Image (cartoon, grey):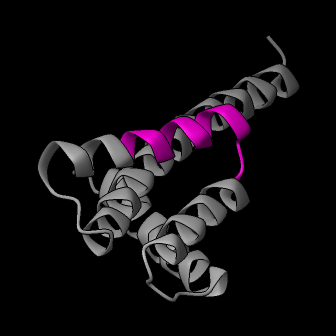
Amino acid sequence: MTTFDKREEAFERQFVHNEGVRFKALARRNKRLGLWAAERLGRTGTEAESYAKVLAAIELQHHSDAEVASKIQRDLEAAGVSISEAEIRHLMGELLAKAIAEIKDGR
């Protein structure tokens, strides 16, 4: 195996690792985001958990933060809670950064 082959293999391993961390972090972020939104919608317990699962499913199906943010904004507005998509996206960024840090720290 040449040095180039070893280097390519190392890059591939790093890519797989990074994608695994990203997947776990997005799942963690979406759960927390869903629970946050559910609280504002007055949902608790299994209703809140179900709402968080719906958001996770949207992320898996569409691979889009925009779809997740849009759903939350529509649901909150329908419940009379005024919040901008920019505020939701800001929270999404904060929660994702926190989730990545926790995963890297082994939590």
Q: Is residue 23 above or below residue 80?
A: above
Which span of residues is magenta-colored? 52-64
Asked whether residue 61 is drawn in magenta, I would say yes
Q: Decide whether the magenta segment is chiefly helix, strand or loop.
A: helix
Can you tell which quarter of the image residue 59 is in?
A: top right
Picture quarter with the N terminus: top right
The residue nearer to you, when weighing 28 against 73, is 73
Q: Is residue 85 above or below residue 32?
A: below
Asked whether residue 59 is drawn in magenta, I would say yes
The residue nearer to you, when weighing 64 against 25, is 64
Q: Is residue 96 above or below residue 11?
A: below
Q: Position of residue 99 (x, y in %)?
A: 38, 60
Can you tell which quarter of the image residue 19 is in?
A: top right
Can you tell which quarter of the image residue 65 is in?
A: bottom right
Judge left or right: residue 105 versus residue 51.
left
Judge left or right: residue 101 versus residue 89.
left
Q: Position of residue 90 (x, y in %)?
A: 56, 82
| Residue occupying the point 61% across, 87% down | 84
Q: Position of residue 29 (x, y in %)?
A: 42, 57
Q: Is residue 55 above or below residue 14?
A: below
Judge left or right: residue 1 versus residue 22.
right
Q: What is the count of numbered marks?
A: 0
| Residue occupying the point 53% across, 35% down | 57
The residue nearer to you, when weighing 92 against 38, is 38
